[in-house]
Image (cartoon, coloured by chain):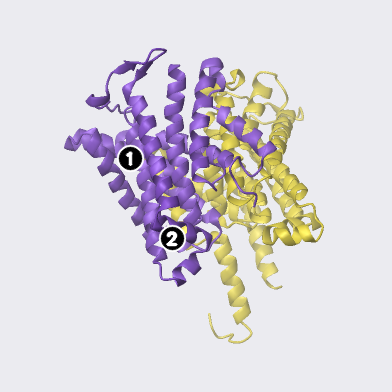
Chain colours: A purple, B yellow
Amino acid sequence: MGQLMLGLVNGAFYAMLSLGLAVIFGLLDIVNFAHGALYMMGAFAAWILLDRFELNFWLALIVAPLIVGALGVAIERSMLKHLYGLDPLYGLLLTFGLSLIFEGLFREQYGVSGKSYPVPELLSGATDIGFMVLPNYRAFVVFASLVVCLGTWLLIERTRLGAYLRAGTENARLVQAFGVNVPLMVMLTYGAGAGLAAMAGVLAAPVIQVTPLMGSNLIIVVFAVVVIGGMGSILGSVLTGLGLGVIEGMTRVFYPEASSVVVFVVMVIVLILRPAGLFGKET
Amino acid sequence: MHNNKLVRATYLVLLVVLLAAPFIGLYPVFVMKLLCFALFACAFNLLLGFTGLLSFGHAAFFGFAAYVTGYAIRVKGWPPELALLAGAAVAAAIGLVFGLVAIRRQGIYFAMITLALAQMVFFVCLQAPFTGGEDGLQGVPRGTLFGVLPLASDTVMYYVTAAIFVACFLGIARIVTSPFGQVLKMIRENEPRAVSLGYEVDRYKLVAFVLSAALAGLAGSLKTLVMGFASLSDVHWSMSGEVILMSLLGGVGTFFGPVFGAGVVIGLQDMLADKVGAWVTVIIGAIFVVCVLAFRKGVVGELQAFLERRRARAPHSPARL
């Protein structure tokens, strides 16, 4: 049961990251390899904010995404905007290079050993819910990520801004012709995606060791999740993320050796049966 | 095409340098390592440059073949020529499986799928008993090639490595200029048209993928023989990233670009590794960013474009330049 919960926690991170990837890919046509590095920097930002400035977890949950989001905006303005209209592979390569830079810088500064981040006091301890003992913080992570994902979904599907965003995904030039400031929208989308990754990083800090390598290990799994779910649908990527987290958790119980590859195996099976992904549209 | 003369002269000079390298003070083990990675990059470029498929998982072929060769020699006591072939054959087999799965999706998804599949191979290598886990396979003896050539001598090993490299380089050039290669280029330029002309695009892609995997595997096997070890870093995703950088830096879709790129990347790592630590990653990342933003054709590609521009301009205004 504990492993299942841990799987659900991991799934929550997969969901948040693949959601950000899907939104960025939709509007910018760029697969953001740096997503893992942004997630790592979110976790580090939380750790540094606590260590240096004694800002607690709740403030870090707001401040860290803002810092990383601002960095994302800077990246979009200075580099990514030069790649629009080119083969999307260049975006992947550029963001891959960026993630190497960030990872290297943090490794140089903090080494590869993990930093531990304390669980916020309010959420420490565990609750006995009858059939299992539930650590409060883990329940909070799953809950918080569901709220964030649902909030993003509502923002995109139910608001005016979201309508612009969806229209921009379909045909950016036409939307621009209608007087919407598309470059601004693109910039904010990348910034928001970066902030979302950072928020996942802050949430992850108390459950796992904060290391410079935590992002790159995760991003590859998230890529597999995205391939499985298809990048077309937001709810689809959330469901796929959570589902795969649970499958991974179960595998850890029954056959631990395979737990690190099970997501990839699922990916292969899905590709054979439904090449476009579970929620994807055939292109 | 008076450009051809220049190209031929350049290759001739390079061949002479390659043959004379041990006598003009170049450290043979370094040049051999460079040749292994240059072969790896050329194999990768066959796929990206001439078929237009970006594989983010070539480390799997390179690294797994390195393990196979190391295992065949150290544990099974196979002669080096058989161990090399075994490495390439296993890499081709993995390539076939990867290809069958990944070719079902295109473009950016293809890159993500190959990356994920290669990560699977990485975890297998991390946990399987025959790879030596975190330590890798150390102390693989070079043995005697065909029972006559003692590879323990660096000079003999050097010329064997150089011969394999030149043969593969010419082989790749032959593949690319063949009718088969022309079809690959058509797929790169305009896949729907290739389909409408009646070519079975997926089959061509698969053959190109398997060829590229086999050659990448041969490069990995050769590396084990030269360096005497196979380790986890050979199968790690960062190795896939490095080989992309080599092609990109030198020039995707050029013949010599990947060799040049491999030279720069391996040279940099060799010079900087013990001096700057983690900064190597930062520098590699920065080169990536600069390449993508500033010169997407790569060094050799930009040079070619420059020569072509000059030739195009020459008849009109010969006084310039």
Q: Is residue A208 visible?
A: no
**Label 1 to label 2, Cα distance in Å?**
28 Å
Q: Is residue A233 above or below residue A220?
A: below
- Secondary-structure class at tag 2: helix
Q: Quadrant of residue A63?
A: top left
Bin the neighbour count of mark 1 within 10 Å (Cα to Cα): few under 14, some 14-19, many 20 and up: many
From the viewer's perspective, is A253 left or right of A281?
left
Please tell me whether mark 1 or mark 2 is closer to you in this view. Answer: 2
From the viewer's perspective, is A194 left or right of B165?
left
Q: Chain of mark 2?
A: A
Q: Position of residue B30 (x, y in %)?
A: 54, 41
Please state which of residues B48 and B266 is positioned toward the viewer in this rendering. Answer: B48
Judging by the rendered image, the residue that carries numbered circle 2 is A164
From the viewer's perspective, is A222 left or right of A111?
right
Q: Position of residue B59 (x, y in %)?
A: 58, 38
Q: Quadrant of residue A113?
A: top left
Q: Is residue A246 above or below residue B216?
A: above
Image quarter of the N terminus of chain A: top left
Judging by the rendered image, the residue that carries numbered circle 1 is A42
Extreme front residue here?
A158
- Secondary-structure class at tag 1: helix
Please state which of residues A73 and B263 is positioned toward the viewer in this rendering. Answer: A73
Task: Name the mark on residue B178.
Answer: none
Extreme left residue here?
A53
Which kind of residue does numbered mark 2 sit on? Tyr
Q: Position of residue B109 (x, y in %)?
A: 59, 46
Q: Chain of mark 1?
A: A
